[in-house]
Image (cartoon, rainbow, N blue to C red):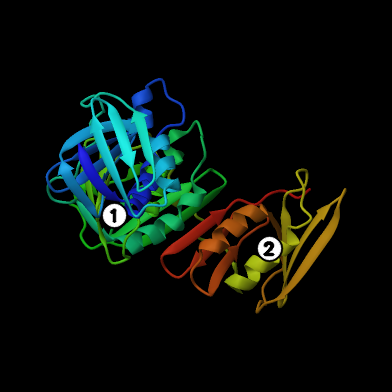
Amino acid sequence: MKVNFNRAGLAEALGLLTSVVPSRTPKPILQCVQITADEKEARICATDLEVGISYVASEVQVEEPGEVIVPAERLAGIVRESVDEVLLLEAAEGTCEIRGADSHFTIYGHEPGQFPAVPGFEGEADIEIALGELQGGIEQCLFATARESSRYAINGILWEIKDKKLMMVATDGRRLARCRVKVASAPGKDKAEGIIVPAKTMGLLDKVGGSEKDTVAVKLVDNQILISCANVVISSNLVEGNFPKYEDIIPSDHDKKLTLSTEATLSAVRRSALLTSEESRGIKLAVEKDKLVFSCRAPEMGDAQVDMAIDYKGEPIEIGFNPQFLTDVLRVIRTPEFELELGQADRPGVIKSGTNFLYVLMPINLG
């Protein structure tokens, strides 16, 4: 194999591919990338056997077709530190040579033909959606997924197609984020039932570069999802298990409703949380006539209070929340204002932004 790569394009490809390469594995070949060149293009693949990426590199000149399997981090490091605009990769019998204007590296890899197969995208898509829409939805849900929970179903994002919209739902048991995004084409009813896509896969899709107008094609095959956009195909196993019945968690009878400035509320939450500690992690929201007071009290550190003028004439209420969970959601709200709905101090709060985003947050006891 002998291929000239645009260094910047190769660096971008390896930046995405190395994010699926496992740092520890009993199978050393999984810590490699596979580069396959034919007469016209070079394809680079990586997989951890659960998630795979197939990436067609841009701006390449193939002199000799072939295949090489080389350690991903070694190759990525060389490409990242190189100052050349073009790098020549030449491979034979499991050895890869990388040449720049003033540099020459030799990496030892694996014999060709040993790398696990990484699926490509073939046939018609089941779902088509604008990349910008999908990435916007991922941003508004991904942060609420569970991290390493034994309940595997909540380690992913639930996808449901309803009324020409993709509903994405994520929860970690203490909060829940739900958003809707428009789809260009939707599947038949047999494929529209809820599937759970791993958080890792969603995070990869959020990193895919390209124009917001690019279209993402999605195909569901057995227990796998294939996602194609521009020159990238991501393949992933789906999460098995039953996602919680999220409709039962969303309160619909709250009688205290406030319209708040997103920017001002984020500032108030961050300032009032400055004196929280490991022992007292919560902040208190005290809602009264025309005023919302954010406060925290840490016996060993002191206390903080931030007042905000609001338009409110209802019953007063005091409720405690984890400030980090509030900060997380306020950072992803794209409207200048949002609605906060409250019931009793021991019931979840609901945050709404427009008609397509909703967030449910469990209160905490401030003692």
Q: Residue at x 13, y 50 (%)?
A: 124
* Amino acid type indicated by mark 2: Val
Q: Nearer the viewer, mark 2 or mark 1?
A: 2
Q: Residue at x 52, y 39 (%)?
A: 147
* Amino acid type indicated by mark 1: Ile
Q: CA distance from mark 2 to mark 1?
A: 35 Å
Residue 240 in sight from this viewpoint = no
- Is 25 located above or below residue 222 in the figure? above
Q: Residue furthest front?
A: 102
State the image coordinates of residue 176 (x, y, percent, origin top left): 50, 51
Label 1 environment density (alpha carbons within 10 Å; few <14, some 14–19, many ≥20): many
Q: Which quadrant is the N terminus positioned in?
A: top left
Label 2 environment density (alpha carbons within 10 Å; few <14, some 14–19, many ≥20): many
State the image coordinates of residue 38 (x, y, percent, origin top left): 14, 42
**Front-lying residue, 286 or 256:** 286
The residue to which callout 1 is attached is: 161
**Front-lying residue, 229 or 318:** 229
Residue 272 in sight from this viewpoint = yes
Q: Is residue 237 left or right of residue 291?
A: left
The residue to which callout 2 is attached is: 269
